[in-house]
Structures are given as C-alpha cells and as structure tokens.
Image (spheres, rainbow, N blue to C red):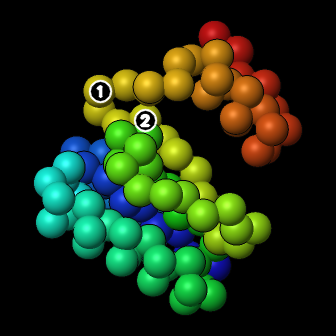
C-alpha cells in the first residue's frame, strides 16, 4: 500500500524526505482547491493507496469522505496544529494504540 501526502510545499517536502511514496503540493487558491478535490477523489478511488495525509488547513477547504480505506489523516502544517496538542495526542493514541508523552 502506498502513502500519499497533500499539503503546502514545506510540509510536503518534509514528508518527501521521510519517504512518503506520493506527494502533492497545493496552495489555498480557488484553482488549487479544485485540483485538491480532484486529486483526493482520485487517490481514494485508486485502490493502491492505503494512507492519505492532508494538512489541517487544506482539509478545512474540502469535504473529507468517511471511508474505511484509504485511511485519511489530517496533519499539522508548518504553522502548527489547529486542533491543539491534546487532540493530536488522542488521535495518535487511537490510531496506533500508543500514548505520546512529553
């Protein structure tokens, strides 16, 4: 299964360096948001993508479908998390069963 990331250029660069299979850069312009919607739909329908990472700011601009696979996770971008640290810890705990400690 492949991992794809959708985000701003800085966030995408970080995930590319970490070894993500596919990375797509989008800005918050109307044209890019339309491209984002199309790319998200395509990745969901492909079948070889197991995880889609999307920045929280971009996820606010599109409707994230409720699908079992691929797993779609919202991640913070270079500006930090909009959800807050406590919420992120809970997401990680539920997703992988490990509680992050400081």
Among the 4 quarters of the image, the one containing residue 94: top right
**Disc 2 marks which residue?**
76
Q: In the image, which disc is placed on residue 42? A: none
Characterize the local packing of mark 1: few (<14), some (14-19) or many (20 or more) Cα atoms within 10 angstroms: few
Position in image of residue 14 (x %, y %): 32, 48
**Vertical order, 31 against 89 (above or below):** below
The foreground one among 100 and 54 is 54
Taking the spot 26% from the left edge, 72% from the top edge, the residue there is 35
Among the 4 quarters of the image, the one containing residue 23: bottom left
Position in image of residue 87 (x %, y %): 64, 23
Q: In the image, which disc is placed on residue 79? A: 1
CB within 8 Å, label 2 to label 1: yes
- In this rendering, does residue 27 appear at all? yes
Q: In screen coordinates, is 82 left or right of 35?
A: right
Task: Name the outermost residue toward the top.
Answer: 102
Q: In screen coordinates, is 3 left or right of 57?
A: right
Taking the spot 37% from the left edge, 76% from the top edge, the residue there is 39
The N terminus lies in which quarter of the figure? bottom right
**Vertical order, 50 against 28 (above or below):** below
Taking the spot 53% from the left edge, 18% from the top edge, the residue there is 84
Taking the spot 37% from the left edge, 69% from the top edge, the residue there is 37
Task: Name the outermost residue toward the right.
Answer: 97
**Vertical order, 46 against 91 (above or below):** below
Q: In screen coordinates, is 17 left or right of 43?
A: left
Position in image of residue 68 (x %, y %): 75, 67
The C terminus lies in which quarter of the figure? top right
The foreground one among 10 and 37 is 37
**Vertical order, 100 against 5 (above or below):** above
Q: Secondary structure at mark 2?
A: loop
Q: Secondary structure at mark 1?
A: loop
């Amino acid at each position: 299964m492949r991992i794809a990331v959708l985000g701003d250029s800085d966030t995408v660069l970080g995930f590319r360096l970490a070894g993500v299979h596919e990375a797509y850069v989008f800005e918050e312009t109307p044209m890019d948001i339309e491209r984002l919607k199309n790319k998200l739909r395509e990745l969901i329908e492909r079948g070889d993508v197991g995880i889609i990472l999307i920045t929280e700011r971009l996820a606010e601009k599109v409707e994230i479908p409720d699908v079992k696979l691929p797993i779609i996770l919202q991640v913070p971008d270079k500006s930090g998390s909009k959800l807050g640290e406590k919420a992120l810890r809970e997401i990680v705990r539920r997703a992988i069963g490990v509680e992050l400690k400081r």
